[in-house]
Amino acid sequence: MPATNSADGTALVAGLTESQLHELYYALVRVRAAEERLELLHKQGHIGGGVYRSLGQEAGSVGAAYALDRRSDGTGDIIAQTVRACGALFLMGGEPLDFFRQYLARATGPTGGKEANVHWVDYRRGLVGPVSPLGTMVGVMAGITLSFRLKQEPRVGLVFAGDGATSTGAWHEGLNFAAVQRCPMVLMVEANQWAFSTPTRKNTRLESFTQKAAGYGLHAESVDGTDVLDVYEGTKRAVDRARAGEGAGMVEMRYYRLKGHAQHDNQEYVDPAELKAWEERDPIKRFGERLLSEGWATQKTLGALKARAEVEVSIAAEQAVGEPIPDGVQALDAVYTDRGAKTPWTRLETPDPIQA
Amino acid sequence: MPATNSADGTALVAGLTESQLHELYYALVRVRAAEERLELLHKQGHIGGGVYRSLGQEAGSVGAAYALDRRSDGTGDIIAQTVRACGALFLMGGEPLDFFRQYLARATGPTGGKEANVHWVDYRRGLVGPVSPLGTMVGVMAGITLSFRLKQEPRVGLVFAGDGATSTGAWHEGLNFAAVQRCPMVLMVEANQWAFSTPTRKNTRLESFTQKAAGYGLHAESVDGTDVLDVYEGTKRAVDRARAGEGAGMVEMRYYRLKGHAQHDNQEYVDPAELKAWEERDPIKRFGERLLSEGWATQKTLGALKARAEVEVSIAAEQAVGEPIPDGVQALDAVYTDRGAKTPWTRLETPDPIQA
Amino acid sequence: MGGKPDSVTKTERREPVTLLEAISEGLFEEMERDERVFLMGEDIGVYGGAFKVTRGFLDHFGEERVIDTPISEGGFTGAAAGAAHMGLRPVVEMQFMDFISPAYDVITNYIATSLYRGSGPLPLVIRGPVGGGNRGGPFHSQNVEMAFFHTPGLKIVYPSTAYDAKGLVKAAIRDDNPVIIEEHKGLYRAPFLREVLPEDDYIVPLGKANVVREGSGLTVVTYGMMVHRSVEAAEVLHQEDGFEVEVLDLRTLSPLDDEAIVESVKKTGRLLVVHEDTRTGGIAGEIAMRVSEKAFEWLDAPMLRVTAIDAPVPYAGALEDYFLPQIEDIVTAARYLAAY
Amino acid sequence: MGGKPDSVTKTERREPVTLLEAISEGLFEEMERDERVFLMGEDIGVYGGAFKVTRGFLDHFGEERVIDTPISEGGFTGAAAGAAHMGLRPVVEMQFMDFISPAYDVITNYIATSLYRGSGPLPLVIRGPVGGGNRGGPFHSQNVEMAFFHTPGLKIVYPSTAYDAKGLVKAAIRDDNPVIIEEHKGLYRAPFLREVLPEDDYIVPLGKANVVREGSGLTVVTYGMMVHRSVEAAEVLHQEDGFEVEVLDLRTLSPLDDEAIVESVKKTGRLLVVHEDTRTGGIAGEIAMRVSEKAFEWLDAPMLRVTAIDAPVPYAGALEDYFLPQIEDIVTAARYLAAY
Ligand SMILES: Cc1ncc(C[n+]2csc(CCOP(=O)(O)OP(=O)(O)O)c2C)c(N)n1
Ligand SMILES: Cc1ncc(C[n+]2csc(CCOP(=O)(O)OP(=O)(O)O)c2C)c(N)n1
Ligand SMILES: [Mg+2]
Ligand SMILES: [Mg+2]
């Protein structure tokens, strides 16, 4: 469904109808509920690997993905999510159930326990999960969107990447490729002011990431990443340009990482006053207040949306917890399309390498 | 000697005295003579590897290096040269003799035949020859100049890199590091409009490389690379800023590669009219005419300088040709400081690996 | 669009082709056969690539299928992966394989793991010139197999003849896994490799070694340029010593055809690995380990190797010749093993 | 400047240290001893590094000697090389060694070749956490030795005890060649590795393996985490089979101490290589080749290996456990060889 006006009403703001605004709110509360549940599962000892939050950044990923043509048949727009773009992941059609399966390393999850967290791929829904090395996905998305141009498909690709990731060579090479090849790609800079414990000023000397865009000859938008409508509108402009054949673009989302880099990081290094100030700008609170004050939603509706999100998330989490973990031997599968890895001979019944 | 006014006269232009202007002219004709001689040696079959020219770009490298504090005791400024910055190499004190030895793979050369062309290092004269992978030297020079800042030495480093090299991740990471760490480094962008057969528009979508500087929060100059004085002045401003502690900078030198990428490239892909137009702007011709028209030199002086350069080059070339090539066994040396490679056992007198 | 470039019509015209021309033909035919195949690399368009492997391709296939890239091996290899996700079949040229290094991260971490991470098959070919003997110095002479041999998920191919080169290129492009093709510069235009190729659409399957010379006294396992040096050495040994050497050309390095190796060693009882790459950490080690695992009882002598020395590739001719394994080295080693 | 952080004063206080603390002490002492030594890496300052190896260093040594870098492994490793050219002795931390990949180009092409190219010795240490068993998935669990083992000019160190870790770190910093140090995450805080270290300024020389358990029946060559699994397996074999296994901890992978390996194999006649890294192209191959070259006649059984399987490192516990070599694998292999 293209995120234009729905049939059931008139546009209230940013070209969005009441039900679309409610959909946005739902998307916001759902990602928050999912991550809170995730934290709980972690505290309960269910999760072996790292656990990440996008607290304070939900409006960025939700607003951005809302500007896309989202489909589930492999013909729509596409994103490369990050752990901070979990809201986009869900909005594209990624299931909270799969989210929990991934973190819980369940056999039933999209990678069968081979990969973790949001690192999963579903081309039909337009999801290309990342790898860990930062910057890589910019080049990959350049190639994905190059294929859209070559095949003359009216599709756009959104690649999320942190502000810290802008320092990587992969980021530079990928973005330059997309610029030169006029790929319909939009780079979403998640300017949350931190790269792990490193503040932005130690990653770059510029003031705004839009200054980087000029170095690639790109159009750039800078949006308030705590305002879901501002993100939506700015991204939509960039996406429309890209779809219209004007080449790659960039959107800087200005916000703040409200939690540590991951669960293990208590972010002692953050100035509490600064943190406090940004907590005031909680994107869900802000959007909720706006909906109420403009009369676009009632307290009751918002409460119901939140409750629905919590139920959805809860059912998903419980189901995932109950599902099986993979069999060790599955570690052998899918190294090549035409063969897996060999079983260690020491685990065969006849441990004779000469006969093996 | 710092490139300020010499004692023997008053400044005529750009703060330079007559003898300095002549020195510049000499530097220009010397590099051209050296490269012409090199081409000849190549045609005569003396050279195994690739042969590169900096035709049309001589004013860039000469003007830039002239803005430096050039010493031969390891306390002066430093450059990372390229094949197109041969003029800088000589001006810093790199010997034409070593230049020929390198191309001719002589045992007597600075790398003893292990490396080729301008890939040589002489820390005392401030020369850090490059490796082939493009962009690498930007990071290396960032570190060299970081050490200047850490040790509080008033030294500056100049790293030359082609316009094509700006697309590499190494370039980006190195430049960003220098920017953030406020290293006294100046990046010289050799904007000769080609990267091998690839025109600039296929390497980047921007109009001027100074637009890239903003993305790193850097000051940038754009200079006419065919005008040795413009290059000198622009570089000097950037170098002075860097020396004054204002951090890294960039200078774009606008010119044109008048020969193919290397000897084997007949540059069929170049528009002859465009080439012709740029040939008109031959930097030596331009500077010579200026010197004459302003009355800063006579035809005779220029002729004498050129003749002197040709003699110097000629002596060097002939000496190099007569010198020995390395012994094969020297290939084993200097892999580690504490050991070389092992001799292949098949070349020992007792070819018994069990006894070896 | 322009017609077929001459360089790819020799087989049609029943003329002999060089190894380089065989590669051009292979690429060209696959591009004709399958419109999803497209090329990316530096200077591959108008210029036709540093070695002219794709000369004339731009005219024939147009800018959308022959893409000149910025100098950014990591970036365009990553882009190739993205295009492959979307169903295209990219073939990427490294101008010199030495410059694959900036793409090491994306190749080993992203591309090689794609299938395992559930992101689907990744049909992608990375090809380019390798090897020494051309006075290219440390950055235009490397063999890169050992940078990637260790990484599960990648295939590596290294042809030594025109026939194999064409057949392997075509098989690599049709393979659903990422494949690296190493093309030896010294073989590109070697006159002795010119041959008239079959007219039919043949491939050489990946993963199959080839016995290029039969013998019963010693197995030489090798590939690339060293196949020819080994065969020459074998000829010397035949003539001068009456000693018969079996020469096995691996053709594909990964996956390694250990069956073929083991079969030959079981016959000869002696193994010599010859590779142009440096010694320590070269592929000879893996081969020795596999033979030890699977044919130890058949070994009548130590497994040995002839390789380049453990150093960067030096520029000067005399140094490079010393650096590289020579025919005499192979002869010496073989004689030692024959007498063992 | 702040005082000495607690984490580096345990030896002074005669308290036992973990392997991680031993590394911290080694770094700290070298920085105190030699003001040319400085650190670069991501989050090593205020945060003290992802694993807190440099906790408190920033306060003590200041921002000029403990430099937080942008996320650019290639860039800051290149910068380290430049600083080393000018006489400094940089120690670079990779947050996880998996992220050394973007620096592959500068390490193999620039740093490793520096001396050979006439650009002088390059004293430079690159260190960081490696290894599996922590549910880190494919990009936080890798062993990286085989990406660099093949490159002449580099040294590679992989400690398995607190004593060795400190001594090797100090030796690496004093070495005039580039050294890569792999630190196993699973050993960082392993309680059984806590030991009271000597108070004196000792080093453990690079290039020397260590016999951690003597035995006459079988030589197990190993390193890192697998040293401990091998010792445990040896204990089982001693108890249950009365079979005595010699365990050789390589400590330095490059240069390889083949003398020590060969000496042991000549004594036992049997070789098993155990490494955590994946199988194909692992270091076991090189070891097998060297033993074949130098001690073939002493071998009474095939040389074998126990390794991880040829796959990326999977995330799920069950998968990762299957992926990694386990004690039972070593026992099985050793029994097979004992009975051979
Ligand atoms: C190439 C590379 N180096 C280091 C890391 C380790 N690492 C993981 S996340 C992170 C910080 C990322 O910061 P940023 O890009 O700003 O994203 P954020 O976490 O703030 O969303 C680092 C250094 C990595 N994943 N990749
Ligand atoms: C990483 C890398 N990729 C490819 C090459 C091969 N190569 C050598 S020079 C060159 C063109 C360089 O263009 P530019 O940087 O503009 O320098 P110019 O030759 O114009 O001075 C290329 C592609 C290389 N040296 N390094
Ligand atoms: Mg961030
Ligand atoms: Mg250029």
Image (spheres, coloured by chain):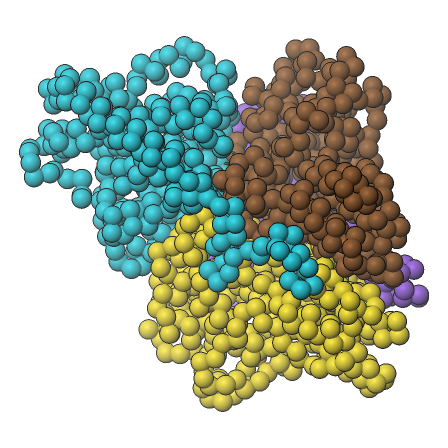
Chain colours: A purple, B cyan, C brown, D yellow
* Residue D145 relative to residue A227: left or right: right
- Residue drawn at 18 percent across, 43 percent down: B2
The quarter of the picture where the C terminus of chain C appears is: bottom right
* Position of D282 relative to C191 (above/below): below
Task: Give B112 or A75, whichever is nearer the viewer.
Answer: B112
Quarter in which the N terminus of chain C is drawn: top right
Please indicate whether residue B108 sits to the left or right of residue D185 in the image: left
Quick one: B219 or B267, which is closer to the camera? Answer: B267
In this view, the residue in front, D340 or D64, is D340
Q: Residue furthest bottom?
A: D14
Residue B288's spot in the image, x, y percent?
21, 20
Q: In the image shown, does A225 or A159 lie closer to the viewer?
A: A159
D37 shown above or below B242: below
Q: Is residue B276 left or right of residue A325?
A: left
Vertical placement of residue B55 versus B316, above or below: above
Give the residue drawn at x 35%, y 56%: D86
The residue sitting at 62% across, 37% down in the picture is C130
Look at the image and tell me whether residue A275 can be seen: no
Q: x, y (%) of residue D285?
A: 72, 58
> How many marks on residues?
0
Q: Can residue D214 be seen in the rendering of this structure?
A: yes
At horizontal 58% and vertical 37% (from top left) the residue drawn is C133
Quarter of the figure with residue A137: top right
Q: Position of residue B297 (x, y in %)?
A: 13, 22
Q: Position of residue C97 (x, y in %)?
A: 60, 38
Q: Splitting the image into 4 quarters, where does residue C107 fall?
A: top right
